[in-house]
Amino acid sequence: MHQVLITGATGFVGSALAASFLARGAGVTAISRNDPDGVRTLNAILSAAHGFELDISGAVKKHLRVIDIDFATLESTLSDEVLENITEVWHVAAEMSYSAHKLAQSFETNVGTTARLYQAVAQRACGCRRFYYVSTAYVAGLAGGPVREQLHAQSQMVNTYQVTKWSAEQSLRLLHERHKLPVSIFRPTVVVGHSHTGWTLRNGFGFYMFQDAVLAVARAGHKELALDLLPRIRPDLVPIDQLANDACSLTLRNDVGTEFEVFHSAGGIGVAIDELVKVWGEVARVKTRLGKPTTSLEQKFDRAIGPNRPFAMTEWQFDRSSLDAAIDRHSPVRPLSREQIRNLCQWYAGDVALEHARHAVEAG
């Protein structure tokens, strides 16, 4: 039986992976911080299962354990008893900040903790077959164009999250040479909600930052909005259910090999920005168009989406042929349709999201 250790199981990707592994018959050891009774982690995993329409009630009782540890003292709080039966590790936990002011803190979390966890597993989890690290496809930088599944020697990067994820990949490559525990770098593109149910976390991160901002405009009573974006750019959106399927298929392979791997969990490019702008407007009931911000409200909106603007102004073609070969996938991934994206945004635009959006713009 597979026993998968997962960090970050209270987050969007981590909870989805935990629920999906449990549904596939694997055991899950969820490593958590500041959750001594495990309730917060359990609720996050159950919420993800509900969003995936999975019944994992029996599996949770039999095959889930939540371990509360202090990452500052990881080596001593992650016991041999926890590690002895682990067959795979999925390191999902990360500092998500874009801020340059948090570079040192992000580096310690995204690079330092990753290296320390890898070394602990390599030295003490004798049955572990492979260490999977969730990075981001955007370590490729902002040049755009075709991107192969390989490490990047250099990239043009614009935020702390990119820089520290790139650095963690390089660190793991060096550690793999030293300790030999096989490593897979798993790089999602822009992660969005479940392609059928719409489920996601309403946290305003990534793609949903744009929908949040348009919802805030609607909440403020405005009916029109100009967005300063390029019309024909097509973002690569990967639904969380496809990402989870990619991850589970990789993990449950019979032969995981010994080499260092790099994979793109990409959803493909389909709907262009000009149509996405219309979708955000339709959902929020605001007349949206492409154009330079002229009103004070539009300028405020422009500042609100600033951190993710570069990623909506560049088009990448992420290769996923190595991933597809590894999981024995023969049919190409089908990008989300306009209607599917609209359904995702409509699910997101509940009362909670409207209130969150209002506070986000007020704070900006």
Image (cartoon, rainbow, N blue to C red):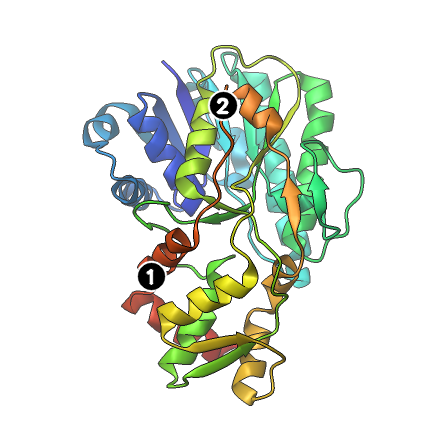
Q: Is residue 230 left or right of residue 244?
A: right
Label 1 Cα crowd, 10 Å radius (few <14 / some 14-19 / many 20+): some
> Where is the N terminus found, in terms of image quarters?
top left
Which callout, 2 or 1, points at the residue further toward the start of the chain? 2
Q: Residue at x 49, y 44 (%)?
A: 335
Marks 2/1: CA–CA distance? 31 Å
Residue assigned mark 1: 346
Choose top left, top right, bottom left or bottom right for residue 66: top left
Front-most of residues 269 and 362: 269
Measuring 42% from the left and 31% from the top, which residue is drawn there? 245
Q: Residue at 37% across / 86% down in the picture?
A: 221
In this rendering, the answer to whether 23 lies above or below 239 is above
Q: Amino acid at mark 1?
A: Gln
Q: Residues within 10 Å of mark 2 (few under 14, many from 20)?
A: few
**Secondary structure state at the residue bearing disc 1:** helix
Answer whether residue 360 is visible to the viewer in this image: yes
Q: Which mark is residue 329?
A: 2
Q: Are marks 2 and 1 in contact (CB under 8 Å)?
A: no
**Could one spot residue 356 in this view of the protein?**
no
* Amino acid type shown at disc 2: Arg
In-front residue for pair 279/221: 279
Q: Which mark is residue 206?
A: none
Q: Position of residue 97 (x, y in %)?
A: 58, 57
Q: In the image, 178: left or right of 33? A: right
Q: Residue furthest bottom?
A: 295
Compared with residue 50, is residue 258 higher up or lower down, i.e. above or below?
A: above
Q: Residue at x 28, y 24 (%)?
A: 63
Name the residue nearer the viewer: 220 or 266.
Answer: 266
Percent across and percent down for residue 342 are 38, 58
Callout count? 2
